[in-house]
Amino acid sequence: MQGIAVPMIGGMITATLLSMLVIPTASQLMRRRRMAFERSEG
Amino acid sequence: MKLQLKIPPVIVMLLFSIVMWLAARALPQFTRFHSANLYFAGAILIGALVVVFAGVAAFRRARTTVDPTRPEAATAIVRSGVYRISRNPMYLGFLLVLAALAVWLSNAVAALGPFLFLLYMNAFQIEPEEQALRVKFGAAYDDYVNSVRRWL
């Protein structure tokens, strides 16, 4: 494969996985944890 | 039972995580939660992963083993990359993972976990490794020990 193509495709794959899976999961985990405490206080 | 080098540190870290999580669950009166803690925990976790992967990458480049149960199988002293800063970056990374979990849980009892992990690692993993490496590499290893610290 061409020298520049590998990192380009790698970047497209990792950026997609990061924004579609990792970030929503992290956000959901944080939200759930925060809500658990808000419920116990309120 | 001799515990030296028996349990791979990743497993030790997972066991510590489970105990910390159970402790935080069982003792909520020691929890002081703030939502900013979640962002701190995330930042520490990212740092931890960077440190661990930097360590593994340096071992790969030197073509030596990362098997923590057989330090005598090591084929080279790695002094490059993160190994200029810490002699045990992978274990330092595991310690940071536990620190991130402690911040995430925001529980005083769970926060003891990283300290106990550090003591466990020194006694049951790092010191036996150091002895094996000293036997294997001799003065070259002593030289490295004298120039880079064990954790940071």
Image (spheres, rainbow, N blue to C red):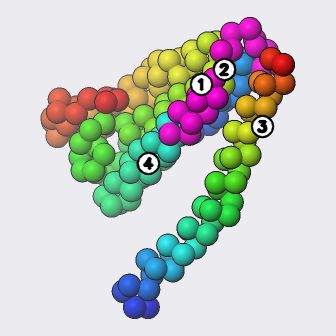
Task: Determine if the magenta segment contains residue B77.
Answer: no
Badge 4: few (under 14), some or many (20 or more) residues near its Cα, within 10 Å?
some
Work out whether disc 4 and disc 2 sit on a shared chain: yes
Give SS at disc 1: helix
User: Residue tagged by mark 1?
Assistant: B102
Residue at 24% x, 50% y: name it: B80
Which stretch did the figure color magenta? B25-43
Q: Earlier in the sequence, mark 4 or mark 2?
A: 2
In the image, which disc is placed on residue B33?
2
Amino acid on which the number 2 mark rests in the picture: Phe
Looking at marks 1 and 4 on the same chain, the residue that comes earlier in the sequence is marked by 4
State the residue position of label 3: A32
- Kindly indicate whether the residues beneath marks 3 and 2 are on one polypeptide chain: no
- Reply above or below: B89 against B150: below
Q: Which residue is mark 4?
A: B50
Q: Position of residue B127 (x, y in %)?
A: 38, 25
Residue type for callout 1: Ala
Q: Residues within 10 Å of mark 2 (few under 14, many from 20)?
A: some
At mark 4, the secondary structure is helix
Query: Dot 1: few (<14), some (14–19), or many (≥20) neighbours within 10 Å?
Result: many
Q: Residues within 10 Å of mark 3 (few under 14, many from 20)?
A: few
Residue at mark 2: chain = B
Q: Nearer the viewer, residue A9 or B6?
A: A9
Residue B135 falls in which quadrant of the image? top left
User: Marks 1/2: CA distance?
Assistant: 11 Å
Query: Where residue A25 sits: x, y (%)?
Result: 71, 51
> How many marks do you count on the picture?
4
In the picture as drawn, the residue positioned furthest to the bottom comes out as A2
